[in-house]
Amino acid sequence: MTDKKAPKNNPDIEQTSTCDTTEPSEKNKETESVSPSRRGFIKQMGGLSVASLMGTAALLTHSDDAEANTTWAEWFQGNYRLMTDEEKEQAIARLERRYTSEFGKQVTVDGTPAQEGVLFGYALNIQKCIGCRRCVKACVEENNQSRGDKQEIEWIRVLKMEKGEFTIDKMNDGYPGGYGIQVGGNAYSAAGVVLEGEHYYEPKKVPESDSFYFPIACMQCEKPPCVKVCPVRTTYREPDGIVVVDYNWCIGCRMCIGACPYWARRFNWGEPNLSSKDMNPKTHYLGNRPRMKGVVEKCTFCIQRTRKGRYPACVEVCPVGARKFGNLLDPDSEVRRVLARKRMFRLKADANTYPKFFYFID
Amino acid sequence: MKKYNISAVLIVLILAVVSSASAQEKKVVTKKAAEPQKEVICFESRLGASEVTQREIKPGLPNVKCSPKTGAVLWWGDPYEGTVPMGKMPIKADYSKGVAVVKPRSAKMALLPICGTACHNGTYPPLPKNKRPRKLTMHTDIVPDSLNLQHGRGAIWCLDCHNTKKRNKFVDNFGDEIDFNQPQKLCGKCHGPIYRDWRDGIHGKRIGQWATTGKKRWFVCTECHNPHDVQQGKRNSGFAQLAPEPAPILPKGMKNADHERHHNTDESGQENKGSKQKGH
């Protein structure tokens, strides 16, 4: 804060100093030290009572163990985006302790920030996808979602869609079947593709002859509607383009679920069911660390892997190689080569969300 | 001011009790039962190609996680396990900056080291005089699909790909050898545009690091496609049908998924047809 002592009549410096987030608090401190205001007094008293009560509460519930202390500290931690590096380190160390004791094995929580010059992009060959759902299951293996009959959470959904045809005999066909959104044909009969998929298809073998398959997950939009609506700003876009959620700051209002045009977000209605054996111990604070009841989660392009250089789990598992991932700012990357050479589209481009998830065909 | 303080104290007290109570609830006792180790073998991309035996790299970190339903590998702990350098990249160009490794196929084929010298040594058995296809009488156990070759629509036969004089190698357009671990050189003879896409990472599959300069394991052609059955008969598709992973569980209270059935499937499809006829 060297510009603090600058003369007030310099508008440039004044402007930059107000942009700095640490400035207001320092100003407050200064005024408080001169003349203690009512607000300052209350603040101090509040802090005092909190400190004393923490001790009392610990005594009252006989829980002087690490778990209780961690819970306390988590209650009072800030939004991850606004934490200082030191606070982040503390929060991460706390979580590592908690998860390690909870799951009975060494769990690491990573806080690797975004790399300079990287903007993640994803391309999916819609013509190749055979609907085998291996990506869905690989995602679950990697990202510590809740599993089991009580609460199953999957970030990717694969829709089976019927192959549309614009044939002359369909144009004059009778009445609609009552399913789907009409995109062709006449007022009574839908010709062409209907944008209504089957989630629960279960044939013996895929692909079926009359269908194609449409995997949908978070599109990591450049203008994410979910970020716009979040009342506590716990979901935000990282510099490398990944939209993340700070689960500790999430209040579970589910506004983002309503705002997302891609049905990409999931809510933990109950306590997540994750066994120690299934748990993936390599986690990231903003990614696959175990979630709690009442928070929203979604695809993060496997932030714990991609920030360390590894492909996302769904890219690796795809048996037909339909999924491509890379750096959009690198002209030699696989995604850029796809965009340069293939015909592509973005889902619901008219929603003006600018997804970084591209569908392409050969 | 006292009022404020008292209310603050009350709120904090309530919070404290609630949170510590929930913290105690969450405690999960995890027991490690000593189970007898069973060997699990999973397949990587397609059934019949590369396979992996499940083991632990480090305590708690398996080399692969497999699907309990289909036996397919779902997750790699170490993407480079059992791989060797690809050797010369297919073509030297500006995109071959990274490190490429492949999983050798030769390790799986027991007869490969000797078949080129012991039996098919170039003079015996007598070399065929013409390219007219004839029925394979031996080795039907090694290549069961070869009796009904589904590749090239009758235009090609065995020795267009397999080396006549050295049976443990493939053959290129000039009669030179191609290694069994580099089928892309063979397939690229005919499938040029796909070979180009594969080289650039658009076609096919790679695992490892996403960066252009990173280390990647490339999957070669035969790891995903069965070269003797690429046509798949009527399906006319390069990729065999396989069993899908289980569907997501239905939402609470929902008995079945009939609500989402399409026009052309099952009962609802028949109903639609009926209504159509009535309408006209």
Image (cartoon, rainbow, N blue to C red):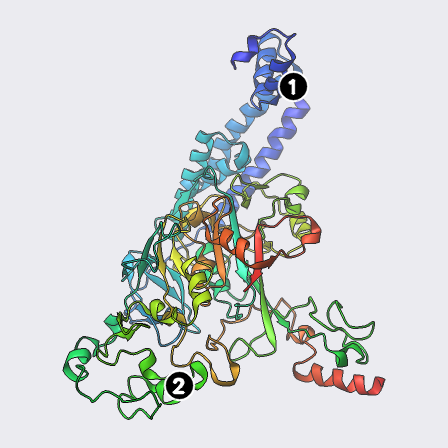
Q: Which chain hosts label 2?
A: B
Q: Is residue A64 visible?
A: no
Of residues B87 and A235, the one nearer the viewer is: B87
In the rendered image, the vertical position of residue B187 relative to residue B124, given as above or below:
above
Of residues A65 and B89, the one nearer the viewer is: B89
- B63 sits left or right of A279 in the view: left
Q: Secondary structure at mark 1?
A: helix
Three-letter amino acid code at the position of disc 1:
Arg
Question: Do badges 2 and 1 share one subunit?
Answer: no
- B38 sits left or right of B198 in the view: left
Q: Residue furthest right?
A: B280
Mark 2 sits on what residue?
B149
In the rendered image, the vertical position of residue A53 relative to residue A123, given as above or below:
above
Mark 1 sits on what residue?
A39
Q: How far is the residue under mark 2 from the one under mark 1?
A: 85 Å
How packed mark 2 is, by other alpha carbons closer than 10 Å (few <14, some 14-19, many 20 or more), is: many
- B171 sits left or right of A61 in the view: left
List x then y, in percent, for residue B152: 43, 81
How packed mark 1 is, by other alpha carbons closer than 10 Å (few <14, some 14-19, many 20 or more), is: few
Residue appearing at x 40%, y 38% in the figure = A93
